[in-house]
Amino acid sequence: MKKWNLFIDKLFNKKIDGNGLAVFRIVYSAILLCEISQLYYFRQLIFDKVPFIDRSEIDFAIPIALWFISVLFVLFGAFTRFFSILNYVLGLIVVGSIHAFEYHVFYAYMGVNFLFMFMPISQCLSLDRLFIKLKYSNTTFQYNPSKEVRQFYYFVVPFLGLGIVYLDSIFYKVVTPMWYNGLGSWLPSSIPMMTHTNTSTLLNQEWLIKAIGWLTIVFELLFTFVFFKKKWRIGVLIGGLILHFGIFIEFPIPWFALIGCSIYILIVPVSFWKSIFTRKDNGLPTLTLFYDSECPLCVRTKIAVSHFNSLNRISFKTVQLDAQDSIELKGVDKDLLLNDIYSVDSKGKVYNGIDTYIQILSRIWYFIPFSLLLRLPGIYSITKRIYSYVAKNRTSVRCTDDNCGYNVPVFSNPDNLKILQNVTLFDIKRISWKYFLGFAILIQAMLITHSWSFEKMREGLNIKNSSLDIYYMNVTNGIGKLTKTFLGLTEHQVFTDRIHFDNYNHIVSVIYVDRNGHEKWLPIIDKNGQPDLYIYGSNWVNWTFRVNGMTVNQNILSEGVKRYTAFWAKKNKVNLKDAKFLIKVKKVVAPKKWEKDFLNKQIAKPWIDGGYVEWKDNKFTSNIKNIESL
């Protein structure tokens, strides 16, 4: 315990460059926006009792849209604290309302979103940083906030988002035949409805693919104990990215894979991010901006442009001190220079007004689309008029030391603020994080006791299903339900034969038959028996393991087909007053041992008739055959 306290204290006391944390915020938020966009598109499928027919009591379009907006603000780092809180609350509402479409990455989102509320994620690469610069700057002083954050914040997300996840999953995998036999990577990649690609060339290398399975276990076992060590960092980073990029290639859960990749950004050496964001662009600046150093609006413009000028392709000079030395501006009256914004490119061409802004935007790579947009004839003329109006109506009073007296503000470190006589805000933060991590470790340790490894222990001790065991499991299950929803702390029995693959022997696809007898495969399962466009992320989990599964419940299957056909019909303008859908079944085998070219053999198996379903006047009738007996 003493070593743990010293370790956390060391992480808290050391400050490092915060650009890596900012890059993680941006990448993570972008991936979360993709997930939210998918939820929005499929919201009727997910939340309606019957899509577009028997509507959900709550219209989730509004909370999902608000969630999207809040994450967008977090991505840009604008009013970050407020929108981080809103992001967590709205995520809790949306994710907490999803049941049949629940999947594992939802709880990764909830965990990271919770942490974001308390982390300095907008210290760098954010609009908040610009707002602070503008707030405390003037014509005589320009404030540049620190870019440093405490090293602890680079540690906490990988530890909670990856470390304890991997460690928990090990207690399931080591007693699972597919994993200890080396088939952990091969088996799910060899059943058509589990994978959206065909990597048979790799799958056919028996010892290589088995080695990958065993190395995955070793990597996940060691990760928690070595990822923060400097000498292990590059190896852990490469191994982790390969693992999650492999998931991205093989399985239709792209956001799950990419969220894992995004967390590895925090393991990239900080020196790398520092060098990226402090390096200069090759060559000299390609645009020189002349601004009025006595004009508050002009100075604020210069500060804003400097904020986004990360590659330093724009240099800045004042009209008062530098314009007279510019050959290109010799013929421009000084009053014009003071009343407008002029710039000169590396070829000596002079720009002013809106044309200067177009040149500025073209030299900041992520603003290039706006530069192109402003060049369009109609938009150009409108923005030119707007600019001219603003320029004419801005304050014309020069701001000098005589009439704009400005005392440089004294900036105190909020961490030094005393809460009690001998307790600072920094002490409160450090102690709170220690207790939170201790709580998270305790909860995850409790959940590990639910694992199959501990189940075997309880069986060996002959205490399984005893009154004490039942009481303990009931209590811890209740706690686990709360921590899963609110903190993302949960069990990780993912991709195991016991709950996902044993005896899974069928693939179900749905085909629409129009009035002319033409058949159209719904984008659920394609003709190979592999996931199609609808079956990604939560939809794949729903169709593959809930609508279907290792064993088939005919009622659940029928209800699932009802949902998907109703959703597809509305999206494709098919009238459900009279519509027929065929059910096709491909019988496959869940392998128990490695076999060469197994995936292609399963793909080659024929489709057989599985019955049909009909819609008459928006009423659904199922005539699906018993899948198990086919």
Image (spheres, rainbow, N blue to C red):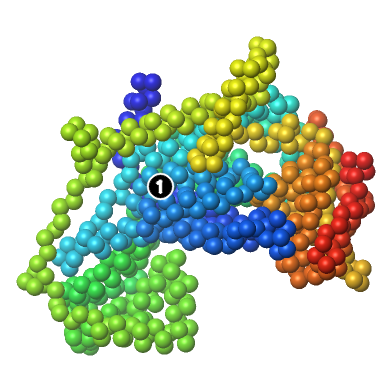
Residue for point 26% across, 53% down: 145
Q: Is residue 148 left or right of residue 86?
A: left
Percent of width and height locating residue 599: 81, 43
Q: Quadrant of residue 284?
A: bottom left
Q: Count residues near mark 1 (Cα–Cα under 10 Å), then give few for <14, some for 14-19, many for 20+.
A: some
Q: Quadrant of the C terminus?
A: top right
Q: Is residue 372 left or right of residue 407?
A: right
Percent of width and height locating residue 55: 68, 61
What is the count of numbered marks? 1
Q: Nearer the viewer, residue 452 or 561?
A: 561
Q: Is residue 278 left or right of residue 546?
A: left
Percent of width and height locating residue 401: 9, 69
- Position above or below: 163 against 137: above
Q: Nearer the viewer, residue 602 or 578?
A: 578
Residue 437 visible: yes
Residue for point 27% across, 66% down: 303
User: In the current view of this chain or complex, which residue is farthest to the top?
Assistant: 461
Residue for point 65% across, 36% down: 494
Residue for point 48% across, 27% down: 442
Q: Which residue is mark 1?
A: 117
